[in-house]
Image (cartoon, helix red, strand yellow):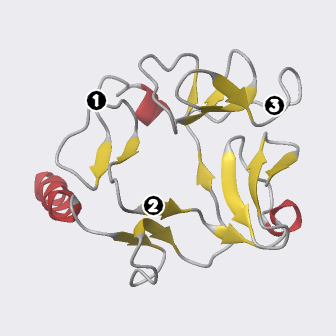
Amino acid sequence: MKKITIACATFLCMMLHAQVAIGKSSITNPSTLLEFGLEPKGIILPSVDDAPGATGGTFIVNINDRAVQYHDGTNWINLTNTGESVANPYVNTQIADKATDHGVIIGDNTSSKPGVLVLESTTKAMILPKVSNPQSTIKSPVTGTIVYDTNSDSLAVCDGQNWFFWQ
């Protein structure tokens, strides 16, 4: 088990300055720091009750406000309705128990920003997983699922029951 952990840590360290493809063999866009494959799957945002030190560009499922939220650098912006519409948020206890850890940083050696996954770049972006009609394509989405809907050309965010689309 120790050898697997060391191998994974070594691999992640080698990727710190690299572009990363998940679910595919290579990056297709040179302006991409993180790019996903074509399977109809989304990113699942962390479910938290607090996000101290959050910076602009942070996405979470706020379990107190029961809403998927984005931090614009000053305020939290709801991407879903608040209240009862958010289904039981999925909480990955393995990540929640390690809340004091820095998580994975891609694009630099260090970051002052808190997060499970922090992308550091001034010249590259993350391309969300692309899914056509996620409301019918993704079966049983988890609260906080986020994708780019190629059918409506918009950001699609699921609260566990409903999809919200942002252009």
Question: Can you tell which quarter of the image residue 53 is in?
Answer: top left
Taking depth in this image into account, of 10 and 93 the one nearest to the observer is: 10
Disc 1 packing (10 Å; few <14; some 14–19; many ≥20):
few
Q: Amino acid at mark 3?
A: Val
Foreground tag (2 vs 3): 2
Q: Residue at x 45, y 27 (%)?
A: 96
Q: Secondary structure at mark 3?
A: loop
Of residue 146 and residue 165, the one placed in the foreground of this image is 165
Residue at the spot of label 2: 125
Give the residue at mark 1.
101
- Picture coordinates of residue 167 (x, y %)? 79, 55
State how far apart marks 2 and 3 are (Cα). 28 Å
What percent of the width, then of the height, locates residue 5? 18, 53
Which numbered disc, 2 or 1, marks the residue closer to the eye? 2
Residue 44 to residue 74: above or below: below
Count of number-bearing discs: 3
